[in-house]
Amino acid sequence: TMPYMKVVIDTLKEKGLRDDYIVLVGGAPLNEEFGKAIGADAYCRDAAVAVETAKEFIARKHNQMAAG
């Protein structure tokens, strides 16, 4: 549920794991502003967009690792 989304992100930060995960949020009651406010990597309006967004983030991370 919405209140626990920030808790999950904050817990990842506290444990030093935040950079290991891509956090996407979405669903009818959410919007991009909410996603930014809780520290998510992206807001996705539906599952299809989430798949494409995840692919983009993974490709970007892969390219950074290959370059660095």
Image (spheres, rainbow, N blue to C red):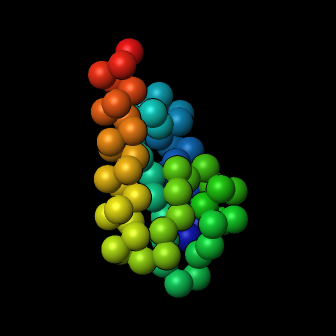
- Residue 58 in the image: state x and y as whole percent: 33, 44
Q: Is residue 58 left or right of residue 42?
A: left
Q: Quadrant of residue 49?
A: bottom left
Residue 67 in the image: above or below residue 43: above
Whether residue 66 is visible to the viewer of this picture, yes or no, is yes
- Residue 7 in the image: state x and y as whole percent: 55, 53
Residue 23 in the image: above or below residue 43: above
Q: Is residue 41 left or right of residue 48?
A: right
Q: Is residue 48 left or right of residue 45?
A: left
- Residue 48 in the image: state x and y as whole percent: 34, 74
Residue at 62% over, 73% down:
31
Q: Quadrant of residue 20?
A: top left
Residue at 36% over, 55% down:
54
What is the quadrant of the C terminus in the image? top left
65 or 16: nearer the eye?
65
Whether residue 4 is visible to the viewer of this picture, yes or no, is no
